[in-house]
Image (spheres, rainbow, N blue to C red):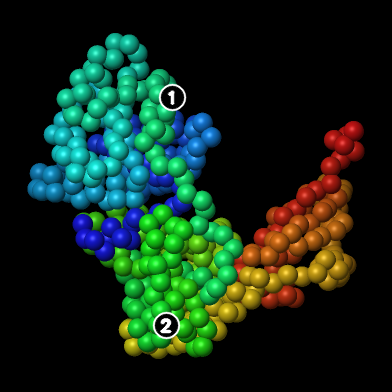
Amino acid sequence: MTEEFLAEVEETAVKPVVAVVGRPNVGKSTLVNRILGRRAAVVQDEPGVTRDRVSYDANWNGRDFIVVDTGGWISDAKGMAAMIAEQAELAIAAADAVVFVVDATVGTLDEDEAVVRVLRRSNKPVILAANKVDDQRHEAMAATMWNLGLGEPYAVSALHGRGSGDLLDAILDVLPEAPPSTYVEQSGPRRVAIVGKPNVGKSSLLNKLAGQQRSVVSDISGTTVDPVDEIVEVAGNIYHFIDTAGIRRRVKEASGHEYYASLRTQAAIERAEVCVMVIDASEPITDQDLRILSSIEDGGRALVIAFNKWDLTDEERRHYLEREIERDLVAFRWAPTVNISALTGRNVDKLSKAIEEAAEGWETRISTGKFNAFLGRLAAAHPHPVRGGKQPRILFGTQAHNCPPTFVLFTSGQLDPQYTRFVERRLREDFGFSGSPVHVEVRARAKRSERT
């Protein structure tokens, strides 16, 4: 575990983070669902179901925190202790506290004790959850977990909820208070996050930008661990780049590193105004690329897509890339794209124009009069289809806010989702919004029987 990696995973989110760790099939995902109060994590009665690490927002007694569900550690005859230590360090690196889950009906195994040694070295608060204590007969078995040396074992039944309240109280006792949100309106340079899956060239891009035209490096305060971000000049414009680069993919560590890279990515998206999504043009577009793009859209941030490693593409690869863009990125056609090479510096200065274009679309506001004139023309030329003998009409519309542009339609009845998407598409044709997601909300007028 390198210091560079620790620096990357330390800043995760503004809420305190609890990592739930343990061997396979001890009930970690079931316990996560119990903590959340809903069935969010996939649960199956066989080991290895949880592979990707997933984080969830949780609340207990008015306190907000994040629960991270981790995959179980499968013992390996070759270097088992080393693999467990590596995974345990990854799991606790982004956490403020750790819930270590053991199976009270089985007792402690060698894998448990190997993880315990790593947890002790971490100096993070550890809550020991002795799971599967479904009735009083298993209480004595839970008490044997004192021998792990982690303090009192909390006897719980994740399946039935027994003892979960005491466990949650113990978790809150060791969690730090949540700092204020890091996404606030700030003056100064525009905040731009460089995001993307590992090994697409985020670090090279930031180094190329900062190395050529860096004006100053500042410690930006107000976040969990004060990460060092870059104030960079690109084509005459000053930007505050939020660094998410530096995590490398290694074959044996890919899932762990990629998960914590995603935590870092999500935190960066929340802090940014514009996200530059870096995609490796020399390789096929992946599901992970699409997940990050969806996170940016769901987060309501402006978007620029940078196809990096253009110097490694030939005519055949570019032909296939065009097909992939048409097939996989059709939902993100509104985002400006730039073909770059972070290694050679090709077109990196063009990022400034794309960022400004996306930011302008993100900040666009349309007057109520102009918007309703647009809706009138649209409804006259393309009225909503008749459904069940009735034809919903748009009565009035307004832009609720910008950043991103969000519109509310007041209607006489529910609109078809296809028609709502049609309104969004025509909004883009008439007003642009290049580089920004556009949200259209429908508020149907209540029926008379509902109003009385």
- Badge 1 marks a residue whose secondary structure is helix
Residue 271 in the image: state x and y as whole percent: 50, 62
Q: Please state, as top left, top right, bottom left or bottom right, where the C terminus lies in the image.
A: top right
* Callout 1 crowding tier (Cα within 10 Å): few <14, some 14–19, many ≥20: some
| Rendered location of residue 393, percent (x, y) | 86, 56
Q: Position of residue 380 (x, y in %)?
A: 88, 67
Task: Compare marks 2 and 1 and give the one earlier in the sequence.
Answer: 1
The residue that disc 1 covers is: 165
Q: Amino acid at mark 2?
A: Ser
Give the residue drawn at x 19%, y 37%. 116
Question: Depth check: 435 or 119 in front?
Answer: 119
Q: Point out the image quarter for the N terminus.
A: bottom left
> Which residue is under mark 2?
215
Total number of numbered discs in the rendering: 2
Q: Nearer the viewer, mark 2 or mark 1?
A: 2
Q: Residue at x 73, y 70 (%)?
A: 365
Q: Which residue shows up at 34% across the image and 46% down it? A: 95
Answer above or below: position of 289 versus 354: above
Q: Could you say which quadrant of the image residue 114 lies in?
A: top left
Task: Answer with the quarter of the image where residue 401 lies.
Answer: bottom right
Front residue of 320/358: it is 358
* Callouts 2 and 1 close, C-beta under 8 Å: no
- What residue type is disc 1 on? Gly
Which image quarter: residue 8? bottom left
Give the vertical position of 175 relative to 335 (above or below): above
